[in-house]
């Protein structure tokens, strides 16, 4: 086992998976909460511009999710490969893989930016942006021009997670969030840039995160892994290891964006653009509420990958079951608190101007949507098991099954076929999540038992 002090996190991942999970999850919870607050901060300030501006930013949200999805997906691929190599006690290969991941991130971000800029307006029109398309494009073009920073910052986190360090990225995100909070009102109102100002503030904050992460890698040079050019030697097997988790994970999150786009169109059909504003705003709250569950799942990738590389399959079972237990408890607590304080939360985003008209519907959305939170605790942990053992395509399929399959099916069935309208669409999310999360849990448990019996 690795003995260097800076490799202590790797030692913990291999020796005590429960302790490693908690140690990595807490900073990740803070980091992901801050990432979620980026969107909430934008929404809170943009709401002062009116419901149409809020809906316009909401229509761009699925596209923003594509950018974040690719960054997180590639980061997951890097975390899997690096943790696996460290579990195999092969630091040289892990260093080489860290450079591979950076090159892959830059290339993919440039390609993705060009494609989305070309098709931005057709996508927004297809989603039914209508009268809000001006706000959506004003916000969207600036975000897309700076998308390399959004993707790159999320992907760099994967290198830190690969060596078991989730603390320093947390520090970068805290400072960046404070910067974003300060810049938002300045750019939106003081400089009178409106939704464009919110986008500029987000990009500047992302740039700041990258600068801090690069400082630790290349100036302070105190990270365990060294993503330096002199450690790079192109290896096809390394590229495949990163891609077999990273690409499906990106598509998996891309599917989330597709779901958001389809669901927004469904809401516009059975409701109005106000319903889209409710969903896009309310979903930001949902993301914050479920952040601890996603953080535990994200930490689980590295813990499982390290033990997978070391062939400690019993540790994989221990980590999975412990992650589910903790996540279920957190899911229940967050669901109850969100339901009780739904009105107070809604008032933050719908307390002035034309935004007031969505307050009641937003309160109702927040009160009902939380039903599925406890089952998400088992679903997320189970999906991330497959990423941790290198079966990214299986994890991708599970997400598509949940979102595009069960959730959209039930939303269409309840909203249109049975005529429950907007409420039926919300309940489609709840029912789809409950069914698919339990299927995923059984699937993951079976897969782990097969590993143990090898």
Image (cartoon, rainbow, N blue to C red):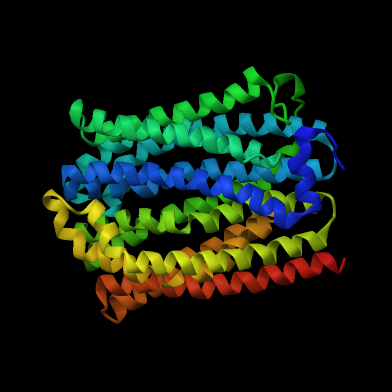
Looking at the rendering, which quadrant does residue 103 occupy? top right
The one of 353 and 237 positioned closer to us in this rendering: 353
> Does residue 428 appear to the left or right of 354 in the view shown?
right
Looking at the rendering, which quadrant does residue 16 occupy? bottom right
**In the rendered image of this protein, does residue 433 appear above or below residue 310?**
below
> Does residue 1 appear to the left or right of 250 in the view shown?
right
What percent of the width, then of the height, locates residue 376?
Answer: 52, 66
Which quadrant does the C terminus fall into?
Answer: bottom right
Which quadrant does the N terminus fall into?
Answer: top right
**In the rendered image of this protein, does residue 394 appear above or below residue 413?**
above
What percent of the width, then of the height, locates residue 367?
Answer: 33, 69
Q: Which residue sits furthest left?
A: 353
In the image, what residue occupies the spot 65% across and 41% down?
161
What percent of the width, then of the height, locates residue 434?
Answer: 49, 74
In the image, what residue occupies the spot 59% across and 34% down?
168
In the image, what residue occupies the spot 76% across and 43% down?
10
The one of 140 and 288 positioned closer to us in this rendering: 288
What percent of the width, then of the height, locates residue 158?
Answer: 62, 40
- Res. 405 visible in picture: no
Number of callouts: 0
């Amino acid at each position: 086992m690795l003995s260097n002090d800076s490799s202590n996190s790797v030692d913990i991942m291999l020796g005590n998976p429960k302790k490693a999970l908690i140690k990595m999850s807490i900073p990740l919870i803070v980091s992901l909460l801050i990432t979620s607050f980026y969107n909430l901060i934008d929404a809170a300030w943009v709401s002062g511009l009116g419901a149409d501006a809020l809906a316009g930013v909401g229509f761009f949200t699925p596209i923003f999710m594509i950018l974040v999805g690719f960054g997180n997906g590639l980061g997951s691929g890097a975390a899997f490969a690096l943790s696996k190599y460290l579990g195999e006690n092969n630091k040289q290969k892990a260093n080489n893989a860290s450079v591979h991941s950076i090159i892959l991130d830059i290339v993919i971000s440039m390609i993705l930016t060009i494609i989305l800029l070309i098709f931005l307006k057709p996508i927004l029109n297809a989603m039914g942006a209508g009268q809000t398309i001006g706000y959506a494009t004003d916000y969207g073009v600036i975000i897309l021009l700076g998308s390399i920073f959004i993707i790159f910052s999320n992907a760099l986190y994967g290198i830190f997670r690969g060596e078991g360090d989730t603390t320093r990225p947390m520090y970068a995100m805290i400072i960046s969030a404070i910067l974003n909070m300060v810049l938002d009102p300045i750019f939106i109102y003081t400089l009178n840039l409106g939704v464009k100002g919110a986008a500029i503030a987000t990009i500047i904050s992302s740039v700041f995160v990258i600068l801090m992460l690069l400082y630790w890698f290349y100036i302070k040079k105190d990270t365990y892994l060294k993503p330096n050019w002199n450690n790079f030697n192109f290896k096809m097997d390394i590229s495949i290891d990163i891609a077999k988790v990273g690409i499906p994970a990106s598509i998996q999150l891309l599917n989330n964006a597709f779901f958001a786009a389809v669901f927004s169109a469904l809401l516009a059909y059975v409701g109005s653009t106000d319903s889209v504003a409710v969903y896009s705003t309310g979903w930001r709250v949902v993301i914050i509420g479920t952040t601890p569950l996603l953080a535990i799942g994200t930490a689980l990738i590295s813990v499982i990958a390290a033990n997978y590389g070391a062939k400690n399959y019993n540790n994989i079972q221990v980590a999975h079951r412990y992650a589910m237990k903790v996540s279920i408890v957190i899911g229940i607590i967050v669901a109850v608190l969100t339901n009780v304080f739904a009105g107070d939360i809604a008032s933050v985003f719908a307390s002035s101007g034309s935004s007031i008209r969505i307050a009641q519907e937003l309160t109702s959305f927040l009160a009902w949507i939380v039903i599925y939170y406890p089952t998400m605790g088992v679903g997320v942990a189970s999906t991330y098991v497959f990423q941790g053992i290198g079966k990214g395509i299986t994890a991708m399929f599970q997400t598509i099954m949940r979102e595009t399959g069960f959730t959209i099916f039930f939303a269409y069935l309840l909203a249109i076929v049975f005529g429950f309208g907007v409420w039926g669409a919300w309940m489609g999310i709840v029912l789809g999540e409950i069914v698919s999360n339990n299927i995923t849990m059984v699937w993951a448990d079976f897969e782990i038992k097969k590993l143990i019996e090898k």
